[in-house]
Image (cartoon, rainbow, N blue to C red):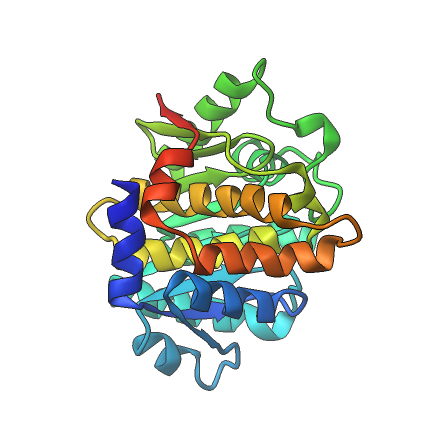
């Protein structure tokens, strides 16, 4: 199943429109190329509807949110909905400021998202109005552990039902769910948190997987998450003694580019509940 989902992205080579943040825009473009998709980065209001019309999916990321791009996000999202394209939201730092929170609330009202991807603090901010978000990373008190995972799964399922979107919560343990079913994924490596943008890269890769695999969107989302985590594991094993997070970022992208479907199947660590 995972192997077929991986292969489909390379066969389809979906064109993905990204309205994303300026910190990681180059990494997001490269991760799409690595996984077999193709990127377009366009956020000016004068062209976003036209650009998204020629693409297969749209990623909206609020990492470097500004007033200029909010209307662009809404126009592109509405156009994508009209065209029945997959749309992924990465609500980076929602809850950290009223501006971010109010913007995400507006986006959720205006756009039907296929999937929403964030850390557990961002999920809590969206689902229950928690203010534990302290920045772009999850609050240390919000870590997903074996003791609280069922509680987080239920919160994600409830929010999926409310939002009618697949919910992806990433951290030491990852959760990918709809209102009825959840993948609990344990691939990954702690050093991934030392690379700025792994979450952003994953969000746009999720869009590519959804676009290429429309018949099973939950599996498509889970496959992208497993792929990213496994790439983090394999990349860490390739680091030499004096190499650090910059090399690690490049190795993650290389691992995704070279990923073999059989290895993905063999080394995937997940269960469905």
Q: How many circles with numbers are drawn on the protein?
A: 0
Camera-side residue of 56 and 105? 56
Looking at the image, residue 256 lies above or below residue 65: above
Q: Position of 71 compared to 95: left or right? A: left
Residue 2, percent from left and from top? 30, 42
Q: Position of 263 compared to 213: left or right? A: right
Q: Quadrant of residue 267?
A: top left
Residue 143, percent from left and from top? 65, 28
Looking at the image, residue 230 lies above or below residue 185: below
The residue lying at 45 percent from left, 64 percent from top is 34
Residue 70, percent from left and from top? 55, 68
Camera-side residue of 31 and 70? 31
Q: Is residue 165 visible?
A: no
Camera-side residue of 177 and 12? 12
The residue lying at 44 percent from left, 84 percent from top is 47
Q: Residue furthest top?
A: 147
Q: Is residue 50 visible?
A: yes
The residue lying at 25 percent from left, 53 percent from top is 213
Q: Quadrant of residue 110?
A: bottom left
């Amino acid at each position: 199943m995972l192997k077929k989902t991986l292969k489909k992205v390379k066969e389809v080579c979906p064109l993905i429109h990204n309205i994303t943040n300026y910190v990681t825009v180059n990494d997001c473009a490269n991760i799409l190329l690595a996984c077999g998709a193709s990127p377009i980065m366009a956020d000016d209001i004068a062209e976003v509807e036209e650009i998204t019309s020629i693409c297969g999916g749209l990623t909206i990321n609020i990492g470097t949110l500004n007033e200029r791009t909010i209307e662009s996000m809404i126009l592109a999202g509405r156009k994508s909905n009209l065209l029945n394209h997959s749309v992924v939201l990465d609500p980076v730092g929602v809850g950290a400021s009223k501006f971010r929170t109010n913007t995400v609330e507006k986006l959720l009202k205006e756009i039907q998202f296929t999937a929403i991807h964030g850390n557990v603090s961002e999920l809590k901010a969206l689902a229950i109005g928690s203010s534990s978000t302290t920045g772009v990373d999850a609050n240390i008190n919000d870590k997903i552990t074996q003791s609280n995972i069922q509680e987080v799964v239920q919160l994600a399922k409830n929010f999926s039902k409310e939002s009618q979107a697949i919910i992806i919560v990433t951290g030491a343990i990852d959760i990918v769910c709809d209102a009825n079913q959840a993948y609990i994924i344990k691939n990954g490596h702690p050093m991934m948190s030392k690379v700025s943008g792994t979450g952003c890269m994953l969000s746009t890769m999720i869009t590519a997987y959804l676009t290429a695999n429309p018949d099973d969107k939950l599996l498509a989302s889970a496959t992208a998450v497993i792929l990213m985590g496994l790439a983090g594991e394999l990349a860490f094993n390739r680091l030499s003694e004096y190499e650090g997070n910059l090399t690690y970022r490049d190795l993650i992208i290389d691992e995704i580019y070279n990923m073999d479907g059989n290895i993905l199947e063999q080394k995937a660590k997940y269960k469905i509940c």
